[in-house]
Image (cartoon, grey):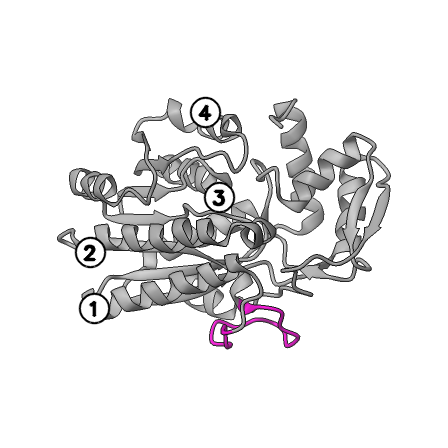
Amino acid sequence: MSAQPQRIVVTGGAGFIGSNLVDRLLAEGREVVAVDNFDDYYDPTFKRANLAAAERRAGFHLVELDIRDAARLGTLLSEWRPDAVVHLAARAGVRPSIERPALYADVNVAGTAAVLQSAVRLDPLPRVIYASSSSVYGDRSAVPFREDDPCDQPVSPYAATKRACELLAQSFHHLYGLPITGLRFFTAYGPRNRPDLAIARFADLIEAGRPVPMFGDGSTRRDYTYIDDIVDGVVRALDRCQTIHLYNLGHSRPVALRDLIRAIGEALGREPVVERLPEQPGDVRQTFADIGRARDELGYDPRTHLEEGLERYVAWRRMRGERPE
């Protein structure tokens, strides 16, 4: 197995993490097939804009396809015969999953099963990297979260689907020897941030002079991880995928909600107006990644502190101008 896969299929390739990963792989001279169905979870115009740079580069291919279409997906992989598949496509969001649990199970679990089934039909087997989430840890009080901690108490359908995907991955490795690595992402942020994520929503509200909702007393903490650090971890995992692995990709420095709001205001040069609201169902008190395994085995070393990351994000917003709503 070569050190660096050269032909890579990226599902969810037009999304926040996916498009940043696509750019990184193309910059390294690799060939990328981005797969996306441009669903309406948020404005598809936003996602198409994410691929503007990639479409100008050699080695980039875009295929519009829903991963639940197992027949088309299988044909795609058979035709392209990739060295690796990075599976990022998913229905995201904790709170929306409470309202539409069946849809989340269909896209995230059935979709992942279709990706894995298509992959194991190839010879040789490709490497598979898939996106999991810090949400699988549930509402834990013991920190930091380690990969071998119990993950049997999800507090949202979204979290349950991500844990189910991890179990599917383990079964496909056991049955077929599929080299597969799961990555538990911890609250990624930065340029191309999904508009529904907290940092993007809060920045929009602060710039508009509208109140920022703060659920609870502002003490909940999240391990915000800058997109370039996340992408670096993905590439390192891709290049080192041999058997079966599972890694946390976080920054390992949780930030309280009240401090995040203040930091966004400072990056924008505006004073936030905070609206206190009750805690929301499905929220957890904290996320906090132990990244020792990823550091030791991948050389993963996140370097972007929140203040620097927010400055870069604000610069991107202002360079890009009006964002699609």
Residue 144 occupies which quadrant of the picture?
A: bottom right
Crowding near pointer 3: few (<14 within 10 Å), some, many (20+)? many
Do the numbered discs 1 and 4 sit on residues whose CB atoms are within 8 Å? no
Q: Tell me the crowding category of disc 2: few under 14, some 14 to 19, or many 20 or more residues within 10 angstroms, Cα based.
A: many
Q: CA distance from mark 1 to mark 2?
A: 10 Å
Identify the mark at residue 175; answer none if there is no mark: 1
| Labels 1 and 4: the sequence-earlier one | 4
Callout 2: helix, strand or loop? Answer: helix
- What's the amino acid at mark 2? Val
Find the distance from the CA under tag 3 to the CA under tag 1.
30 Å
Mark closer to the observer (2, 4) = 2
Note whether residue 255 is visible: yes
Magenta region: which residues?
137-152
Where does label 3 land, which residue?
A: 17
The residue wearing badge 4 is 52
Taking 314 as reference, is 218 above or below it? below
Dot 3: element: helix
Query: Alpha carbon of mark 2 to alpha carbon of mark 3: how far?
Result: 25 Å
CB within 8 Å, label 3 to label 1 = no
Q: Earlier in the sequence, mark 2 or mark 3?
A: 3
Q: At 51% across and 65% down in the image, what residue appears?
A: 136
Label 2 near label 1: C-beta < 8 Å? yes
The residue most toward the left is: 123
Question: Which amino acid type is shown beneath numbered disc 3?
Answer: Ile
Mark 2 — residue? 120
**Mark 2 vs 4, N-terminal side:** 4
- Tell me the quadrant of the picture where the C terminus can be found: top right
Could you give the CA–CA distance between mark 1 and mark 4, rounded to whole angstroms? 40 Å
CA distance for labels 3 and 4: 15 Å
Q: Count how many numbered circles sit on residues in the image.
A: 4
Tell whether 295 sits left or right of 196: left
Task: Compare marks 3 and 4 and give the one earlier in the sequence.
Answer: 3
